[in-house]
Structure formats: C-alpha cells, structure tokens
Amino acid sequence: MTSPDMPPPLAPSLPRVLGPWLAGAIVVGTVIGTGVFKKGRNVAEEVPEFGLAMSVWVLGGVLALLGSFALAEVAIRLPRAGGNYVFLREAYGRPFAFLWGWVDLGINRMASIAALAAMFTESLHVALQQATHTPDEVIGFWPRQLVTVAVIFVCAVVNCRGTLVGAGMQMFLTVLKVGSIVGLAVLPFLILAFSPTTEPKPTTAHMTPAWPSDWGAVNWAGYGAAIVAVLWAYHGWQNIGPMAEEVKNPHRNLPLALIGGVFVLIALYVSANAAYYSAIPRDEMKNLADTPVATEFCLRLLGPVGGMIASLIVMTSAFGALNGNVLVGPRLLYAMGDDGMAPRWLTALHPRYRTPVVATMLLAGWSCLMVILVSLLNLGKSTFDTLTDYVIFGAVIFETLGVASVFVLRVKMRDQTPTLPYRCIGYPVVPALYVLIMGLVLANMILGKQWFESLVGLSYISVGVLVYVLLFRRRRSSPSLAST
C-alpha cells in the first residue's frame, strides 16, 4: 500500500504472469538439487535408528514449514521484486537489505549457479561413461568446462525470453524431478511385484531398529548434526520471494506456493529416504564416500543400468535447480538497482519480453567467469561447494531475519493487517519457534565443525558493512513502503 504523495518505483514494473502452479514449481524446483540424493549418508552416520532418521527429514521439513507460514504473510504485505531484500529494508532499514544483497549476490548465488552447472556436466559425463562402458574420459576436462559455461548461458537466454518461458521450463523440469523421486520411492515395491528374484531384494529388515531401546543413551548432539545436514537439503524454499512482483493474485498464490511447495518437499524427501533403507543397510550407507546414496540404491536394485539412470536423475535435478537460480537471482539485482544500491542500468527490461535482461546476463556472465577461474586453478568442482559453505552462515542469518520481519511489519503496517486474506498461522509462536531453532543452528555452526566457515562468513559480512558505510551511508533513504 502506498500513499498518494509517494513516488512510484523508478524501474518499470515486471508483469504479473505466474499462477499458483508455476510459482509452486519455482519453490519445489529450486530446492531439490542434490540433498535428497546425498544427505541420507550424513543422517545414517549420525542416527542409527530408522525411525529417528526419518524424523530428522520430517523435522527439517517442519522447520521450513514454520518459516513458510510466517514468510507468506511478509510476502503478501510486500509483493515486490527482490524478496528478502525488500523484507529486510522495510523491517530493519537499508543497511540490512544491502548486506543481504552483498551476501547473496557476492558469492552465494553465483557460486550456486556455477556449482549446479558443473554438477550437471559431471553427471552427463558419468552417464556417457556408463552408456559407452568405459572408465576413460568421454569428454575432456576443458570441453566439460565449456559445456558448463554453455549450460549457464542457455538458461540465461531462455529466462531472458520471458518470465513465462523460464517458469514454464522450470515447471517441466520440476515435474521430471518430482517424477524421478517418486520413481525412487516406489522402485522397491515394483521390484518385489515384478522381479521377485532380484538379488539383493528390497527388505524392511534394514529398517530395524526403528527406535532406540534406551532413549537416555541417544546421541542428541549427533541428532542435531543430522538435522543441520538435512536443513541444507531444504534450503531455498524462500526463492519465490524475489519473484513476488510477477505472481498473479499474490495474496492467494504466494501462500499456496510457499506452504504447498514445502509440503510436497517433505513427502518426497521422506519417501525417497525410506526407500533407500530397503536396499542399503544403515552401516553400509554411512560408509558411502563419493557415491550418492541414490546411485548406490539404483545400482543395487537395477544393476549397471541403475547407475546410468541415477546419473540422469541427478543431472535433471541439477539442471532444474540451476534454471531456478538463474530465474530468481536477477530479481535481487533488479531490486537493488531500483533502490539505488546497485547501478541503475540493472533495472533495464527487455522491450519485448519484459524480463530483467541486463541483470540476468550479468549474473550468468559472472557465474561463467567463476567456472573458468576455478578451472584455471584446477581445484575441482568441490571448490564451488566450499565457496557456498563459506557464506551459508550469512545466508542463514539474513533469511532468519527475513522470517522474523513478520513481527516488525505487523507493527509498522498495522493498518493493513485486518484486510489481509492470509495471516501467519500460529502467530507469534510459529515465527518465534523458527527463529529460536535457527538461532540454535547458527550456534551449532559457530561452536561445531563449521566454525572456520562461520568466521569467514562473519568476516565477509564485516567487509560488506565497510562497503556500505563508504558508498551509501550519506545517501538519502528511499521512501518506506511499510511507513505508508
């Protein structure tokens, strides 16, 4: 809601073209990357009982659900491009908004894009090796890097051709990913029904013990570490926020996409990981090194062809998450340009397709440059994951502040509250519980194994504070939407 004397946004508005299904596909499609295929090993390593292991996946999803209940209200109050950037600006001020942009765009988003593209190329290479039955390189190192760059460029071009085009491709890829995970979940039943002679057979014997015989002896510190691992598999559920300006009927469709999308993720993650235990005993699962749990699962039930199928599934999943990040990421650049926190030309829209074409190509170009630089250093694709780990601490801080902004905005925008068609379920307990748990997660990172990454993340944020003070401290603040 804006007052009559408030100037309109400087940038041309983005068209509202996304319905609930496309918005939901952005939520689900950008979250499902590799976590559901790999993090089962981390959970098995820390939690010996099947029932407790499954509860980890449920609780991780419940935490995302608590956050989605609160963020849905924030998003319909401020359905503007930029998502968390706008939420933080209106709740806490421009410095917090700038620091979120500094953290998300500085390394996290483009490192994620580069990592997902590299993952796609490596999965394609493994699939080709399995198809040709050769352990040798089918595609050389540098040709693989060129394929990685080309994949990023293709996603950027597609998303420049129209929000509906990019979201349509996201819907198609999300359907493939969801279908693949459902296929993994029902594979043991299909094997037992149509190929009962398969060895080893899927069995529920690996699912015992289901619960601890002595609850007092449970390693709760390990259980907490398993939850932290699973949280990364759910990370990204907030990605519909930056697209809020392009969602039709946002008061209805944003809550549907956010909350419905998280429910879908919980169902997929729990069912797939339960299926893994039918073929892989926990003691063997926890010792898997570089092989994803899903790949080992398919190899055991389907033989060599299963390895190729698993590689294709991971490849599709990585490409879908890549496309989602290329679609969502430029909206933050667009919002920062509109707010004077980045060059004004980042708000330029394509004259025909009405997409932030300059922001999209800049983000894609920076990600491609990172692929080349890391390749020149010859550090391997794991470098991308390492870079992302260094800033995930900051990402968790500002994303949690985004959820907590529901408390501030209820006060600042109190006149709007009675007319909202959706308000946070269980307020104030639900958002408070989310903030409390994420605070414990951050404390665990600082005091636990990720203390060095947390220190680097805090240092990076400190540099961002210095940059803000030097460049923007004396600038006049833009009008606040929440104060009108």
Image (spheres, helix red, strand yellow):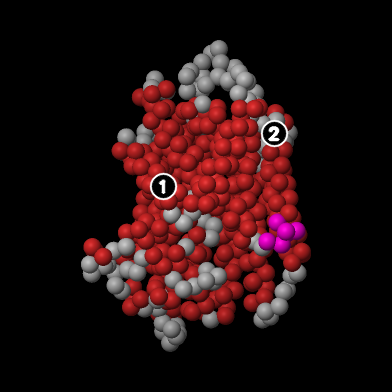
Q: Which residue is mark 1?
A: 443
Q: Residue at x 57, y 75 (%)?
A: 307
Q: Do we see residue 444 in this rendering?
A: yes
Give the quarter of the image for residue 160.
top right
Residue 95, quarter of the rendered image? top right
Q: Nearer the viewer, residue 313 or 85?
A: 85
Left or right of 292 in this view: 424: left
Return the disc, 2 or 1, that comes first in the chain's sequence.
2
Q: Residue at x 41, y 64 (%)?
A: 43
**Residue type of the residue flagged with mark 2:** Leu
Q: Amino acid at mark 1?
A: Ala
Q: Which residues are magenta?
A: 374-379
Q: Tell me if mark 1 has few (under 14), some (14-19) or many (20+) residues whose alpha carbon lies within 10 angstroms of its own.
A: few
Determine the CA span between mark 2 and mark 1: 37 Å
Please tell me how crowded label 2 is: few (under 14), some (14-19), or many (20+) other residues with Cα within 10 Å. many
Query: Is residue 377 in the magenta section?
Result: yes
> Closer to the camera, 163 or 131?
131
Where does residue 387 sit, x and y in percent of width and height? 60, 52
Does residue 15 show up? no
270 and 216: which is toward the camera: 216
* Secondary-structure class at tag 1: helix
Q: Is residue 84 above or below residue 237?
A: above
Q: Which residue position is annotated with label 2?
A: 346
x%, y% of residue 268?
Answer: 43, 59
Image location of residue 184, percent across then percent down: 47, 68
What residue is drawn where x is 32% and y is 68%?
Answer: 49
49 is higher (above) or lower (below) than 422: below
Q: Main secondary structure of the magenta part?
A: helix
SS state under label 2: helix
